[in-house]
Amino acid sequence: NLNVNQGMQYPPPPAAPMPSNSSYQPGGGDLSAMRGSTPPIGNDFAPSSMPSGGSGNSQGSTNNQSSSSSSRRNDSEWQKVRHKQQRLLLLRHASRCQYEGKCPVTPHCASMKKLWAHIANCKNQQCQVPHCMSSRYVLSHYRRCKDPRCPACAPVRETIRKSHEKEQQQGGNRQMASNSNSFDKAPLMEPVGAESGASPDLTRATKRPKIEPSSADPNFNQLPPPPSQFQPTKPPEVPASEPAVAPPVVPKQEVQSAPAPAPMPANKGNEDRSLLNSFTVQQLSTHLASLNRSAELPPAKLKQKCSEVLKGLQTHQHGWVFNCPVDPVELGLPDYFEIIKKPMDLGTVHKKLDSGGYHAIKDFQSDVNLTFDNAMTYNEKGSVVYDMAKELKTKFEADYKKMVQQLEVEDRERRQNDRACVLCGCEKRLFEPPVFFCNGINCASKRIRRNSHFYIGGNNQYFWCNQCFNELDDKTPIELIDLTIAKADLKKKKNDEVHEESWVQCDVCEKWIHQICGLFNTRQNKEHHSEYCCPLCLLKKLEANPVTPPPKPPGASDLPRTKLSEFLESHLVKRIAQRRQQLAEEKQKTENVSLDEALKYASEGGAVIIRQVTSMDRKLEVRDRMKNRYAHKKYPDEFPFRCKCLLVFQEIDGVDVVLFALYVYEHGEDCPEPNKRSVYISYLDSVHFMRPRKLRTFVYHEILIAYLDYARQRNFATAHIWACPPLKGDDYIFYAKPEDQKTPRDSRLRQWYIDMLLDCQRRDIVGKVTNMYDLYFANESLDATAVPYHEGDYFPGEAENIIKMLEEGGGKKGGNKAKTKKQKNQSKSKNRGGTRSTGVDEEALIASGMMEGVRDFSELDRDQVMVKLGETIQPMKESFIVAFLNWSGAKKEDMEVPEDILTYRKEHPEMIAPLTTGTKRSADGQTKEETVLDASGRPIKVIDDDAEDLDCEFLNNRQAFLNLCRGNHYQFDELRRAKHTSMMVLWHLHNRDAPKFVQQCVACSREILSGKRYHCASCPDYDLCEQCYNDPKTNRGSCTHKLQAIAVETQSDSSSSGLTEAQRKQRQRNLMLHIQLIEHASRCQSTSCSSTNCAKMKNYLQHARICKTKVQGGCRICKRIWTLLRIHAQKCKEAVCPIPQCMVIREKMRELQKQQQAMDDRRRQEMNRHYRMSSTGGAAN
């Protein structure tokens, strides 16, 4: 589990403001005062002696600000500042002087010219030329320093200004004419220690992490402190009201040891296109507004603030009139609902507030205003109720305005904090804690409890809870998928990690912001030199100089299109347009607003985009007990199906945000019974950020309706749904959903699906809607082989448990109950003659005790698994939904619907969806494909998702996507995080071969994206970047082991969305040929094989066996071989496959499946427990 942004803290706050410069002189207004002086050398320009750009002064000058100028000159710190001034003026002179011989201005001109010529082009990270590094440091500080009171830079700037004025008055100095390599514009290479935010002339400085001792991070003290080039040397000033925190001790570094970054090309084309830079002024404004915490409050604070205002209204002397809903019958108001279309009262507002029904403060304001507006609409002006409503509305407007002003004041105070993000006004923002799954035999991939101890081993990829660790044998080696370890090799760890959001510094204003707030993509921060401009500076720049923003990086609309996604999206676009119009008309009537204003509200949010990201053939292996019990009936060993994943995006504030995900499993005509021609709605998940929010349920229903319409047109007969919400703490697809988004109860979720299916019935897409119990278990002639066996469904896990119970005799209820049952059944058995028609001796069966749990002898003719399973699911049968699709081969009895549905179809024939089977054909009988055009009228390739595979390793199953999000802190609990997560998910989708996880340097906390990383095999998650590894002064913390150098593969554009149809087919063909070749080479034993490529592939396979870099280290050959092996393993059916790593890959896939099954089993067990308790409680009553 690699936590990409772990450990990125932030630096101490800037020092106190500097005193005015008026009390001291720089020692002369021009170079004439420096004649005969010695150029400053040595350590005077080391980073530790430079004043930071934000502080502007040294500690010595701050302590002695009341001293005289002469005493300052005697101070060592002041001498360093003086040397900087001299060095700056001498370098400026050297850059402008054109004297060929001896310069009459200063005797150091010749040596300074040589130095200037050298540093203007020097790119050496550890240059040994005298004065090179120190001069580059002081120039870097001068170029960036914006402090008008800086003791080093301010006097130099004043001197240069006076010199310019003097030259202008004298008509210019011919001998000092400026040139292209001037002091102010020369392209210098800066050392790493230089601060970010350089002028465009300079190569980008590295992105520095913010460093601060964090009480929230218990592991902070265990990490080595960052090197000095990444933080100011002056410790933070702690206010008296706060407890003092000791800053990390940073050793001073010599000039020669300060490395400089490698040069980066100025223009990298489109591969580094920033999403933020493509925003318009309006998108930037709305994005910044969404970060305003005075408008977007956390659920708890929103409830607190609004409750205070609401309490003042309800306790008012007129509040009793509006505290309850209007009862037209009791009050004798027969026309009330004709006039008031949307009733509202303060009591309903209070209930919604308590239940978390409000997500924004403006929604609360709207409902309270609606309460009083309704009263003023229905009652005549001048009436008692009208005046009461008017008075309370005036009070509410005043109280609401006061509350908003108070929130704005609090927000401004937060933003004034130097340690807070300038965008959101917050300091530390913590991620959800990491999740670990136990690999022990008894735990079956259960989550390891928070704050408990566990054990880690096997390249830090395997975990054991305390109980499973104690059960391990000290002498028996632990056999894992890809390695073998001993119990002694496991290391103890506590599950109490806390990770903080990472920061980035703007290169313009040099302020620190959260990477998530600023939509900063770390994967595009090549060599940590990418230029970054925060949203605030970008907005100011665009407002001052309006220009057309550059094109956006590839987004949701640029993902490959498939027949399924095109069908769904075209259907959804039409339905959304109709629904928006309906919402606008409703708002106009209920709230008495203009249609334009209502349409503006209904049109909030951008276009909705649907894309299919995976379409792969998979197989579900039947569990052992089920397979063995029904082997005599030739029950299949596995069920093949096609897994498809759909993502739904909406553009919000310029970002394509993922809002909905759906996994469906399609069992085609070639799949054996009972799964033949069935579709299983496996998992769906959503977050509530859709705009407007009222569209959310409508859009998700329409997606499912359109999918079932698409499925029946492809001759699928039934759709199966298990309506069961996830347990608390579990996620289906999206990791860490919003706090105020509640998990629905099973009854509400079940009704949600039923409402959707009712719409399907009205449109003649679906016929009969029933449940699994009535369809299968109520029919006594059926056994367990007739029940569909779907991955992730309730039946496979529960059937396995029941078979185990029957095999182990778990159906026995106890001796006393057995005796009672025998006595009761004796008289009945005598009347039946003792022997059944099948020749079974009933008395012998009773005496043997084998009849335990059988209520009637007739049950002997039934499959006991069906009997037991039927008893279990009968109380919750409505949760197992089966819908018969109206396809071309549908049976008449399966199309029966209620009378009201038939009436609706007659009254609304335009709503009936036509059934179109097959593809369109031309006059000559050839298949005719419809051409899809983009916005510019150009044809777009639409992939046949049934004929062509869409492989996405991290979305092929939901558990892989959850692991990606957990490992990279891709969360959906806030809109700002959902924006950043969606941006990164889209980046991964367009760069599918790029590493899913990257390591961080434990010293400087930067992500290691290129070059080499130095890994410790003993310490967990320990890597150093090349720069920190080569720096002898890097604090390595407690690690003393030898580090292994691993090459980091640079990212390459692997997106296939831009390929032509011919290129895509050729790529698919090459892939299949390589898979065939790898299968041949693995089995070939001949030394002189006729295949010309056999020997090459054998060499590649041999390389994969002995390579030490492996896929994790970025080996390109291993990566390609692994991709081929993974595709082969997904379809391999051999019990013992000779192809290398096939069994290992299949075992890893099973591990993911086990994690998924563990969650499904928890859902199933919780559902059983809930209904068992409900039935017990009902019996007790």
Image: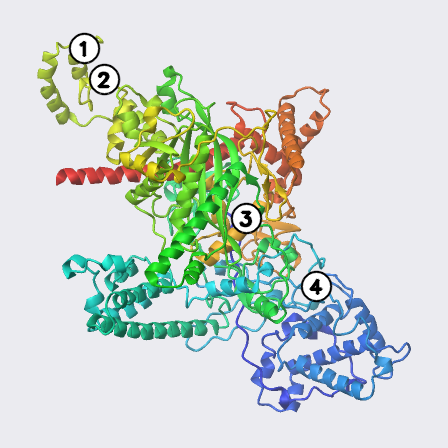
The kind of secondary structure element at disc 3 is helix
Q: Report if residue 996 is visible in the image.
A: yes
The kind of secondary structure element at disc 4 is loop
- Left or right: 900 in relation to 1084: left
- Which of the two residues, 250 or 867, is positioned nearer the viewer here? 867
Are the residues at dot 1 and dot 3 in contact (C-beta closer than 8 Å)?
no
Q: Give the answer, above or below, for where 1084 lies relative to 343.
A: above
Q: Which residue is mark 2?
A: 860
Q: CA distance from mark 3 to mark 2?
A: 58 Å
Residue shown at 33% from the left, 34% from the top: 881
**Sequence-wise first label, 4 or 3:** 4
Residue 665, image x, y percentages: 44, 33
Amino acid at the residue labelled 4: Thr
Q: CA distance from mark 4 to mark 3?
A: 33 Å
Q: CA distance from mark 4 to mark 1?
A: 94 Å
Q: Which mark is residue 836?
A: 1
Q: CA distance from mark 2 to mark 1?
A: 10 Å
**Sequence-wise first label, 4 or 1:** 4
Q: Which residue is mark 4?
A: 203
Q: Give the answer, above or below, for where 1180 lies relative to 674.
A: below
Q: CA distance from mark 2 to mark 4?
A: 84 Å
The kind of secondary structure element at disc 2 is helix
